[in-house]
Image: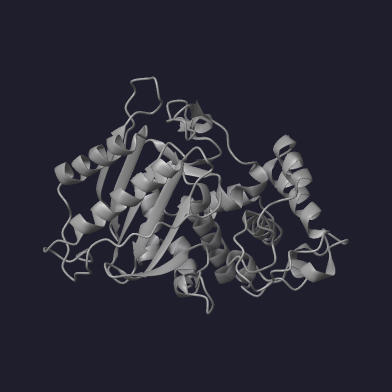
Amino acid sequence: MMVLVCAISGSPASSQNVNPTPQELSASVAEIRQRNKIPGLVVAIVTKSGVESIAVDGIRQQGKSNLITATDRMHLGSCTKAFTATLCAVLVADGKLKWTSTVEELLGSDIPAMHPDWKSATLEELLRHRSGAPSAPSPEDWKEAFSCTDSAEVCRATFVRSMLVRAPAPTRATFAYSNQGYAIAGRMIEIASGKDFESLLAERVLVPLTIKDFGFGIPMKSNKDSPSGHAADAMPRDMDNPNAIAPAGTLHMPVGEWAKFIAFHLGAEPPAALAGAASQLAHLHARGDIEPFEALGWMTADRTWGGKVLTHSGSNTLWYCVAWLSPEKGFAVLAASNQGSDAAAKACDEVCAAAIRDFSKNGVSATKH
């Protein structure tokens, strides 16, 4: 689930925006999906009010005729990381965590054999990929994580414990994208809250945002009528990364539900349960001082169409999605495909650019609501 941030340039920024018509957006999705030869494609334009426009084209599974729909669950891959960082913000607002909380403070008693070089790594460093967490797990840890049949919390504890008794990578303070770092952060969340990560994310982030259709792992496990994932050769396959790294990227939900979370990050009026987390948005979005100037759970970029933007992509190699947010302009675009491949990444990039271009036409302000 390595992050792949597409270089969308889009249209010149405009202070006046209008939604593309459903016909315009649908035509773009259909043309782009068919040209890139991927099974399914969904795109949404989001403002603080939620979904402004959504369009979908394609099929749920290669070789079958069932059409993919706007309410189908899509795998979010590494776009889960923004949810995990937001859950951390909830606990920071509660006083149960600090951005400066260290691995030793939270996990020291659980892992007495922790390697000394891990002890001072902070929650914020983990979320910014600057903790020394390895870019790839050891083959032994990965094999054990895949074969673990215990609860997600127990599997995660075992995975993290095995990692933390060894020395971190010699990259402390240097950006090194790491799913493993988010697994450690997830375990810190569990110790601080006394609840497993999956239940707490649902209780403290998803349910307050009225996100209902969600789950972890492949979508078909939660809803048998969900689309299948597809490999680069377009063959349907359904598998996911182990639940030990769920905080890094196993969440799934419809794009329209994802949009509720995105609207929160655009500055929508938060539900009471997320008022504390909303007060932490500036910290979540704050750019690091050194390239690639990452935020917490997000990557950052400068774009003519959106100013200082937030972005992230996700893929478990069988699905692909990407989000582009412009808090300055008050809108975002999301795209997702039920195939994980370069073609899917290209299609999502193209359809986001088309949505940005259409949305930047003259009209009413994107922040009209």
Taking the image as drawn, is residue 212 in sight?
Answer: no
Is 17 situated left or right of 61 in this image? left
Q: Specify whether residue 147 is in view.
A: yes
Does 278 appear above or below 44?
Answer: below
Looking at the picture, how far across and down is residue 218, in whole percent? 53, 35
At which x and y percent is residue 223? 47, 30
| Residue at 40% from the left image edge and 69% from the top image edge | 301
- The quadrant in which residue 169 appears is bottom right
Q: Residue at x 15, y 68 (%)?
A: 16
| Residue in the foreground of this view, choosing between 89 and 318 | 318
Residue 209 against residue 11 in the figure, above or below: above
List x then y, in percent, for residue 260.
Answer: 37, 53
**Image spot of residue 291 (x, y percent):** 52, 74
Q: Quadrant of residue 36?
A: top left
Q: Residue furthest top?
A: 64
Q: Residue at x 26, y 61 (%)?
A: 10
Nearest the eye: 290 or 59: 290
Q: How many marks?
A: 0
The image quarter in which residue 193 lies? bottom right
Q: Residue at x 79, y 54 (%)?
A: 161
* Residue 212 against residue 92 in the figure, above or below: above
Q: Quadrant of the C terminus?
A: bottom left
Q: How is the image coloured?
A: one colour
Front position in the image: 56 or 91: 56
Q: Is residue 330 above or below residue 240?
A: below
Farthest-out residue, bottom = 289
